[in-house]
Amino acid sequence: MPKVIINGPECSGKTTLCEYLVKNLDAGYIQEYPRIYLEMTNGKYNQDDLEIMAHDINDLIEELDDDRLWIIDTNNINIKIWYQYKYGKLPNDIRELDDNAQAIHLLCKPDIPWEVDALRENPDDRDEIYDMYRKYMYEAEIKYHVIDGEDRDTDALKVIQSYKL
């Protein structure tokens, strides 16, 4: 079974979409690991923390059972984009981590209202970060589907169902 990976800028509906898909597809669910990590550090992090998160995410995804459909709330692409945005050039050990290119990738467009959250940092740069995702995925030759608009949940479900799982 393929994995479904949802990425996108902060507050672009990733977690809400994941929860909808899990319920409607009877899939396993990997929650947004960076959020879990940041909750443990009270939102504080540095470059080393991003490297730890990237390796932890990589290990989590590698260990998943291939006989089940999994919905994954962000993967290493998220860490790579965030690292570039905050610190510039990626270190080799992060750059070389698996992007899970064979998965079904959904990229959430930040066309929904910003919601304040203590762990969110960039209400004004979501479009710029979204463009970084698109550029990265294009250059890495990762096929992805943009999820946007008011019908984003049902549109995402249709995309996944089109793979005839």
Image: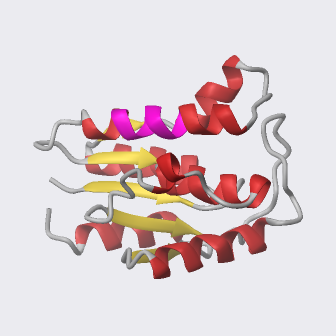
Quadrant holding the C terminus: bottom left
Residue 101 against residue 93 in the figure, above or below: below
Residue 111 against residue 70 in the figure, above or below: below
Residue 41 lies in what quarter of the image? Answer: top right
Residue at 84%, 34% (x, y): give it: 118
* Of the pair 30 and 79, the residue shown nearer to us: 79
Residue at 68%, 18% (x, y): give it: 40
Residue at 84%, 47% (x, y): give it: 121
* Of the pair 46 and 32, the residue shown nearer to us: 46
Residue 17: percent from left, percent from top: 51, 54
Left or right placement of residue 165 versus residue 45 in this view: left
Query: Going by the picture, which residue comes out furthest to the front?
Result: 92
Left or right placement of residue 60 versus residue 112 in this view: left
Residue 91: percent from left, percent from top: 58, 51
Q: Which residues are magenta?
A: 53-59
Q: Is residue 79 magenta?
A: no
Residue 160: percent from left, percent from top: 29, 66
Residue 121 against residue 163 in the figure, above or below: above
